[in-house]
Image (tube, rainbow, N blue to C red):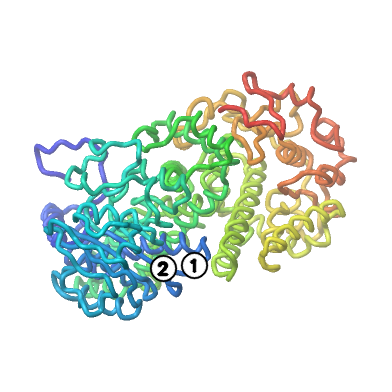
């Protein structure tokens, strides 16, 4: 829907998002009026943020979302910004929603310096409680400026100065605050000094781009009005940057600041809550507008319901922000070891047209691998680009698959709406016109937030499946292992953030291993609901008795990982829950059936076989997010009983210890168990344990299957004492892939 004569250069969009601030809400009303005049199906849901929508400034939603990122930054430094005092400098004034609301979200902060287009505010040592009350008064004062601040409350040496002054005197207190040694300075120089001040947090809530990288010139930035004020990221002395406003920092500057140890995300991560709120508003209105059209809900009642659900909508939005900031921290924890895999993913996205490194400011492969060799991983701003790209790829793949049509995902659809709407309008939610898109969006978010960037995409390449099938396997494993309960426990535990991130990382690795097993034994998995219903009773029975089924060797490995996490400070209950994930009841179809059958009879062994699309040279289907041919032509990871050593192909994705997948003992032994483990009887010990180290694990994985005739056909099983020999390993190497040892550098991708 657009006026005649207008040329659209991007794709068709389902609706129109308008930022509801400083009068722009009237634009939404105009757009919605046009939509309703033309009987457009969205009605007044066409444009968000109108007079009958959510007021972002009244909700303070964008600033609150950005503050969630600030909380994450400081939590990982051992600081609770809601109770611990931090020193803040910033850009903006109390009349704006981004700066003003942001500076009211904690009563513990000390706002020491700020500037807008009219004034410069300096308060070297403010009283947190008194200054918060004054900021609150100014926020409620229409069209306030820093000049309205009660000067009697400003600490010694501070003041408010007009930017029109030729020079501003600096007291000793201000000099100490800003790290200057001059008696006076011009306003432009003072603003630059504020940006470079040795504070804890730099908060952006105003208009303009004030920080660039040293390698950039002002012309590249494209904001000539602030050329005289702009500083280099390498000169910043704050510990963290919060981007409540857009474009305060260039992407190159974010990367440079993060590379020197600063904490920063990106503006599209920090201030995404506004757009997220608009998405929720539109989805709610679409469901309710149908109720209105069919006479079950009046306009006044609908509008009143929107108001009542305001806090619930805000909670949904802020939870998205929290999980996204947490996902970046988990990805960042991968460090240098994850770089080769991330480089491979970048190549995948580039080949499919989803990523332009030049536009996104991502370095070339050789630069990233050099960083990795020096012990540095990708920065949070770089990871943010890959995180968002991975989510979009997953969303498209899920929409193109049959997964959103699975009735078992009805609860995921309902969870995207406030509780009152779930209770009173369940039918409207179930029949939502954007049902598939909502499920795909929520599921893609959850997969990447909980599993990270690498695991889902590596599974596509390793298992010869599509992204849609990976998503289906995620849903199945999530439900079979009650991952939501574990995640909730990890989120709420009062533990050190480093330990929390480690436990999340371990849980993601275990989940990826479970998904790999499920993908192997359930080729073509599209709708997981029926599979979950079939496996759940057996998985529950096995989980309840798994302690008694472990062999001594596997028990030693389990105890070793448990002790490692306990020594790092992890709580005993959470450690046990995470380590237990590495046992594979869900990934072993025969064992789950054994647990489900009352008599304990097992399924007869049968070849897992390879679907036609997984034969060597076959390409992934269209729902594989347009992965490039090099990835799409990878062979199936396991071809059942007919697999031979020469048919085992090396993966180009690199695990965290730097060795190619095909040379990695963990992957080899998992393949061996996938090959012959389907015939393991219930009386034998459970041996499908995947841990991040080797040793006695190899013997444990094979002990219960030595008598199996099929085991002798698998090359891995012929060498129980350790990984394959160099000669045998060489036979499996894909032409052109350089062999690498555990201690050597990772091969170039």
Q: Which mark is residue 86?
A: 2
Q: How far from the left and from the top, in percent, is residue 680?
A: 82, 47
- Under tag 1, what secondary structure? loop
Residue 535 quadrant: bottom right
Q: Are marks 1 and 2 in contact (CB under 8 Å)?
A: yes
- Under tag 2, what secondary structure? loop
Can residue 391 be seen here? The reply is yes
Q: Considering the image in quadrants, where does the C terminus appear?
A: top right
CA distance separating discs 1 and 2: 9 Å
Residue 300 lies, with reference to residue 699, above or below; the image says below
Q: How far from the left and from the top, in percent, is residue 579?
A: 70, 58
Q: Residue at label 1? A: 79
Mark nearest the camera among 1 and 2 is 2
Asked if residue 318 lies left or right of residue 627, the reply is left
Q: Considering the image in quadrants, where does the N terminus appear?
A: top left
User: Which tag, 1 or 2, sits closer to the chain's start?
Assistant: 1
Asked if residue 439 lies left or right of residue 290, the reply is right
Residue 314 lies, with reference to residue 612, above or below; the image says below
Asked if residue 318 lies left or right of residue 184, the reply is right
Q: Residue furthest top?
A: 735
């Amino acid at each position: 829907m657009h006026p005649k004569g207008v040329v659209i250069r991007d794709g068709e969009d389902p609706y129109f998002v308008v930022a509801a601030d400083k009068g722009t809400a009237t634009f939404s009303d105009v757009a919605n009026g046009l939509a309703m005049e033309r009987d457009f199906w969205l009605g007044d849901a066409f444009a968000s943020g109108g007079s009958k929508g959510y007021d972002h400034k009244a909700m303070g939603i964008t600033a609150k979302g950005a503050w969630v990122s600030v909380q994450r930054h400081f939590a990982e430094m051992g600081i609770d910004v809601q109770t611990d005092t931090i020193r803040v400098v910033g850009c903006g004034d109390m009349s704006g929603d981004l700066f003003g609301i942001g500076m009211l979200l904690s009563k513990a902060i000390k706002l020491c310096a700020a500037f807008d287009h009219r004034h410069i505010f300096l308060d070297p040592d403010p009283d947190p409680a008194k200054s918060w009350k004054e900021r609150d008064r100014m926020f409620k004062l229409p069209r306030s400026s820093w000049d309205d601040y009660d000067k009697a409350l400003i600490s010694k040496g501070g003041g408010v100065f007009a930017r029109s002054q030729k020079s501003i005197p600096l007291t000793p207190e201000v000099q100490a605050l800003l790290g200057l040694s001059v008696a006076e300075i011009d306003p432009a120089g003072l603003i630059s000094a504020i940006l470079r001040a040795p504070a804890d947090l730099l908060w952006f809530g105003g208009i303009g781009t004030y920080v660039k990288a040293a390698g950039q010139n002002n012309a590249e930035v494209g904001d000539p009005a602030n050329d005289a004020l702009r500083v280099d990221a390498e000169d910043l002395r704050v510990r963290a940057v919060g981007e409540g406003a857009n474009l305060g920092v260039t992407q190159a500057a974010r990367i440079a600041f993060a590379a020197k140890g600063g904490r920063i995300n990106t503006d599209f991560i920090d201030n995404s809550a506004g757009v997220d709120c608009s998405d929720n508003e539109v989805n709610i209105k679409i469901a309710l507008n149908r109720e209105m059209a069919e006479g079950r809900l009046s306009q006044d009642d609908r509008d009143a319901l929107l108001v009542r659900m305001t806090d619930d909508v805000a909670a949904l939005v802020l939870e998205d922000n929290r999980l996204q900031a947490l996902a970046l921290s988990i990805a960042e924890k991968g460090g240098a070891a994850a770089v080769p895999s991330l480089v491979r993913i970048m190549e995948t996205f580039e080949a499919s047209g989803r990523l332009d490194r030049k536009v996104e400011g991502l370095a070339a492969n050789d630069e990233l691998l050099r960083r990795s060799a020096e012990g540095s991983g990708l920065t949070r701003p770089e990871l943010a680009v890959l995180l968002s790209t991975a989510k979009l790829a997953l969303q498209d793949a899920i929409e193109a698959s049959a997964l959103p049509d699975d009735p078992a995902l009805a609860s995921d659809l309902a969870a995207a709406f406030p509780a009152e709407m779930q209770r009173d309008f369940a039918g409207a939610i179930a029949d939502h016109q954007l049902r598939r898109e909502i499920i795909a969006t929520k599921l893609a978010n959850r997969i990447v937030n909980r599993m990270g960037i690498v695991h889902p995409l590596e599974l596509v390449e390793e298992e010869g499946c599509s992204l849609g099938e990976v998503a289906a396997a995620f849903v199945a494993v999530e439900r079979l292992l009650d991952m939501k309960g574990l995640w909730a426990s990890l989120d709420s535990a009062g533990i050190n953030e480093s330990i929390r991130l480690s436990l999340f990382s371990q849980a993601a690795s275990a989940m990826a291993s479970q998904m790999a097993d499920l993908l192997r034994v359930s080729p073509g998995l599209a709708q997981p609901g029926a599979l979950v219903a079939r496996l759940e009773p057996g998985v529950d029975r096995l989980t309840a008795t798994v302690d008694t089924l472990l062999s001594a060797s596997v028990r030693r490995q389990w105890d070793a990982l448990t002790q490692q996490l306990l020594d790092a400070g992890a709580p005993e209950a959470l450690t046990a829950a995470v380590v237990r994930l590495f046992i594979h009841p869900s990934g072993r179809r025969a064992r789950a059936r054994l647990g489900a059958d009352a008599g304990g009879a097992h399924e007869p062994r049968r070849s897992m076989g390879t679907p036609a699309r997984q034969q060597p040279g076959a390409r992934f289907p269209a729902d594989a997010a347009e992965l490039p041919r090099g990835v799409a032509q990878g062979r199936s990871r396991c071809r059942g009983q007919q697999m031979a050593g020469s048919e085992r192909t090396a993966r180009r994705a690199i695990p965290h210890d730097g060795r190619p997948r095909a040379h990695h003992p963990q992957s080899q032994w998992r393949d061996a168990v996938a090959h012959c483990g389907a015939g393991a009887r219930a009386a034998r010990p459970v041996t499908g344990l995947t841990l991040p180290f080797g040793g006695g694990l190899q013997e444990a994985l094979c002990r219960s299957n030595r008598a199996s005739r099929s085991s002798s056909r698998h090359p891995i099983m012929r060498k129980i004492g350790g990984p394959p020999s160099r000669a045998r390993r060489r036979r499996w190497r894909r032409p052109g892939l350089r062999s690498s040892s555990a201690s050597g550098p990772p091969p170039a991708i």
